[in-house]
Image (spheres, grey):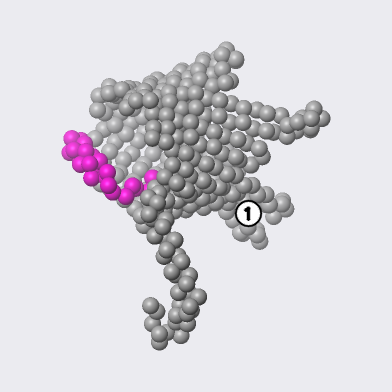
Amino acid sequence: MADSSSPLSFLTDNTVAATIQDAYRAFSERRAALGLSNPGTVDNIAREVQKEVLLSNYMFTGLRADLTKVFCMSPLFRVSHAFAMGSQGNMPPYAFSAMYGSPKIFMQGNIGSDGALAAVGNYRWNSALVTKTNAQIMAGAQQGLLQIDNDYTGADFSASLKAFNPSCLDGGLTGIFVGSYLQSITPSLALGFETMWQRQGLNSRPEAAFSYCAKYKGQDWIATAQLQAQGVVAASYWKKLSERVEAGVDMNLQFAPSAAAALMGGPRRDGTTTIGAKYDFRASTFRAQIDSAGKLSCLLEKRIAMPISLTFAGEIDQVKQQAKLGLAVSLEIAGEELMEQQDKLEAQAQNAIPPPF
């Protein structure tokens, strides 16, 4: 009850406020009785397939060597040197990276020999709210990238608000703003949406887009579906075949309208389907995938000893008759005391709040 001597006590000490409080309390009790769990975020709705099984985040070409020195485990502080040769991506010949992490703060900085600079800074306000910032300056680019994320993780929902290059210095609001929300409806089903608003400049009109998503989780499988803006349909299916084997399917179908398609009586349809599998062995991990475009890819991660690991990547494009290969060597240097400290921290972190990575 509010203090009756307060001049604003009439806002809470009335029949309408009491009715609203009772209704909200009853709704919260029924909601808690359902036993719903957090469904994850909209960005990671297909994480099990796209980030765990498929090779999109792991493929590389050429030769690569990573040397990492760990100075402390709690808080985490390490530096690394990355060397690359023959890479067909944006990887510079040399890059230096430094990382600091604690239960509340995470910071990482990267600088490449080509002049590219990237910085990440995350802060956990409490067990539910995390603010993430990302700044990038690419070599030769006229404009950099500034991204600010605010992620809220509830007991049975997740909400996120992102801003890309926000600015109001020109007399108006410009940039890209994305908001998303994912809610568990039943212990297995989650529904959500994502909305986007952007304006490149004051001389251009603002644009908005809306998308919907759904996630269904079975005992050993997960299915997701997304209806995105401009007629893009995405679906994925992940299944755990055994304790060490996982498989997944990812499909994207885009209905792209064009003038020629309108004359022919319908939109042009482009689609890609990818099937992949992941095998976890005692000291290695093997991933393989094949897509409808005729590309066959595989990646093998092998730990030779505690500080040394090898990664082999290969891709064959049957349509273009091209092949790509990649070989990487990673060396992580840490003392025996740090390794023992890491084992203790991993045992204690099972029930702890995850860091804001």
Vertical comparison of 61 with 205: above or below = above
Tell which of 24 and 166 is nearer to you: 24
Against 302, residue 111 (above or below) is below
- Amino acid carrying label 1: it is Thr
Callout 1: SS: strand
Q: Taking 260 as reference, is 38 left or right?
A: left
Residue situated in front as seen by the camera: 218 or 267: 218
Query: Residue at position x 54%, y 33% from top?
Result: 235
Q: Which residues are magenta?
A: 335-357
Membership of 349 in magenta stretch: yes
Residue 146, image x, y percentages: 53, 49
Which residue shows up at 56% across the image and 25% down it? 273
Q: Which residue is mark 1?
A: 174
Q: Residues within 10 Å of mark 1 (few under 14, many from 20)?
A: many
Q: Residue at x 44, y 42 (%)?
A: 188
Q: Residue at x 76, y 31 (%)?
A: 266
**What quarter of the picture does the N terminus occupy?**
bottom left
